[in-house]
Image (spheres, rainbow, N blue to C red):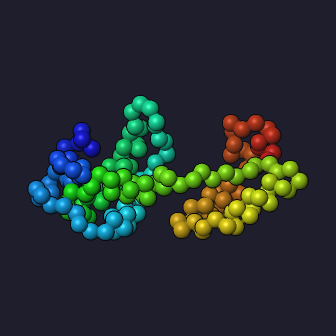
């Protein structure tokens, strides 16, 4: 954001960010949950790759800045850097625990564990998992050109 003229960082503590066209001295005083809700309304962006070293991928930068632009427009003032980080964490599920799915089960023991975990998990409010499952079920061996014959047979 520091390299983009659309944003400006306010001096002082705690660090805050605003849009360049915001009124000087305007500061967000609202509820963090409102900013998170605003970020959730931004559609069409997502994070597919995250670098831990080197430059951030262009698509990731675009997604982050698109959400931040929407949130800062909504706030109409400077927002604490820490709050912006929390908004991004919530919007992109950056701190969600990893989910694992067993592909092969030994006499059902692993499959039972996975099924129990899946039953206990919270429902997917976006419906993405259901769509993904539907697509996966419709795949044919011809849809997997890079897969080995064993993987094609499993599909």
**Count of picture labels:** 0
**Relative side of 84 to 106, left or right:** left
| Along the viewing direction, whichever of 131 and 109 lies nearer the viewer | 109
Query: In this rendering, is residue 27 above or below 7?
Result: below
Q: Compare residues 30 and 64 and report the one nearer the observer.
A: 30
- Please report the residue visible at 47 percent of the width from the left and 41 percent of the height from the top: 50
Outermost residue toward the left?
Answer: 24
Q: Position of residue 150 (x, y in %)?
A: 81, 40
Q: Which residue is pictured at 66% across the width and 61% down the height?
A: 134
Indicate the quadrant containing the N terminus: top left, top right, bottom left or bottom right.
top left
Does the rendering let one see residue 27?
yes
Where is residue 55 drawn, in percent x and y? 39, 33
Image quadrant in which you'd find residue 118: bottom right
Q: Left or right: where does residue 136 sit relative to residue 154?
A: left
**What residue occupies the far top of the structure in this picture?**
54
Confirm whether residue 44 shows in the render.
no
Tell me where residue 137 appears, x and y as whole percent. 71, 57
Residue at x-position 37% and y-position 67%: 33
Q: Residue at x 48, y 51 (%)?
A: 94
Give the residue at the far front of this rendering. Answer: 13
Which quadrant of the view contains residue 146?
Answer: top right
Q: Examine the rendered structure and indicate whether residue 131 appears above or below residue 95.
A: below
């Amino acid at each position: 954001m520091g390299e983009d003229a659309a944003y400006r960082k306010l001096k002082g503590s705690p660090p805050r960010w605003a849009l360049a066209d915001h009124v000087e001295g305007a500061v967000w005083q609202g509820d963090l949950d409102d900013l998170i809700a605003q970020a959730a309304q931004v559609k069409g962006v997502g994070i597919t790759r995250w670098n831990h070293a080197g430059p951030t991928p262009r698509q990731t930068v675009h997604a982050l800045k698109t959400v931040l632009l929407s949130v800062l427009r909504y706030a109409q003032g400077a927002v604490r850097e820490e709050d912006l980080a929390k908004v991004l964490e919530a919007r992109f599920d950056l701190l969600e625990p990893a989910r694992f799915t067993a592909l092969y089960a030994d006499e059902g023991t692993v499959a039972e564990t996975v099924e129990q975990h899946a039953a206990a998990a919270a429902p997917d409010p976006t419906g993405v998992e259901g769509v993904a499952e539907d697509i996966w079920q419709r795949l044919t061996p011809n849809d997997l050109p890079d897969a080995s014959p064993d993987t094609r047979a499993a599909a």
